[in-house]
Amino acid sequence: MELEKLRLVLYWSGLALFLLLELFFTYRQPSVSKLKRWLTNLPLSIVNGVVYHWLYFGSILAILTRNDGGKYGLLNQYPLPDWLQIVLGILLLDFVIYIWHLLNHEVPFFWRFHRVHHSDINMDVSTANRFHLGEILMSGLVRLVVIYAFGISLLSYILFEIMVNIAIQFHHSSIRLPAAFENIWMFLLVPPSMHRIHHSVKIKERDSNYGVIFSLWDRFLGTMTRKIDQDKIVIGLGSHRDFTKLGFGRVMLMPFTRRSL
Ligand SMILES: [Zn+2]
């Protein structure tokens, strides 16, 4: 139960903190009603959180507890120091989300669901949890298999949850940061400017910068885009520009409507 409390605390405190930072250090003024966008994004995250908890949380906890004996999974087959096992666990989980994210763009069936996330016309901290339930169900299953197969430890998973929650809310936030800070941050992690390129309507830009916590995978696997004029980036999908058709009900039906880019 403590783990689930941690997820809730991280979500709501992160939302409040980055919302405050967005108010004081605004990167870009909203082009559509923030309230209306939040009325879509918040219910999506709440539905996702409840279903994820109901469906996966018990299984994840059971596997983590089983793994804690250090007998099961690939990471437990070799005598590694505790700290290295924790670091490898976090890197592995982040690498799997990178690959999963890339597949969400490359496989048309997955894209049907993932385009809900990209359909947000403005980008702010609430975009971080704007996902279709179908994507959450599939990614939850992927996470479950990875934790089981690699024998991720409880501590490794808790640290990963903390990092991933902060990372995802931070890099979706509409915060103006000094260029020098963004460049240093990008050396290892994902700053907002890097992820903003990923939310561009231009498909070439969108199909890059898949990283969630670490920027390493994009850098080493050739999927990183950097030198883009940030002020010229148009956020969203080229095929869904009508904001009045992007309410909660419409986005829930989006995966089942005509295929679009
Ligand atoms: Zn994406």
Image (tube, rainbow, N blue to C red):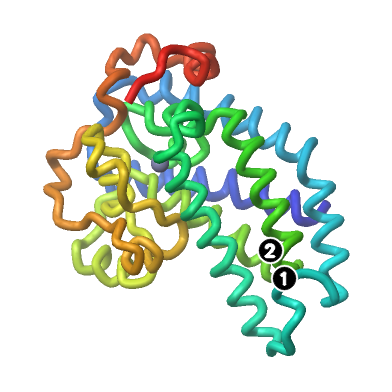
Q: Quadrant of ligand 1?
A: top left
Which percent across, then down, holds residue 166? 51, 56
At horizontal 36% and vertical 10% (from top left) the residue drawn is 244
**What separation in Å lies between label 1 and label 2 (alpha carbons)?**
5 Å
Q: Is mark 1 on a helix, strand or loop?
A: helix
- Callout 2 crowding tier (Cα within 10 Å): few <14, some 14–19, many ≥20: some
Q: Which mark is residue 229?
A: none
Quarter in which the C terminus is drawn? top left
Q: Which mark is residue 155?
A: 1
Q: Residue 158 carries which label?
A: 2
Report whether 144 appears left or right of 164: right
At horizontal 43% and vertical 41% (from top left) the residue drawn is 125
User: In the rendered structure, are the residues bearing label 1 and label 2 in contact, judged by CB atoms less than 8 Å apart?
Assistant: yes
Kind of residue indicated by mark 2: Ile
Report whether 161 appears left or right of 66: left
Q: In this view, does 22 lie above or below 222?
A: above
Pick the residue in front: 153 or 165. 153
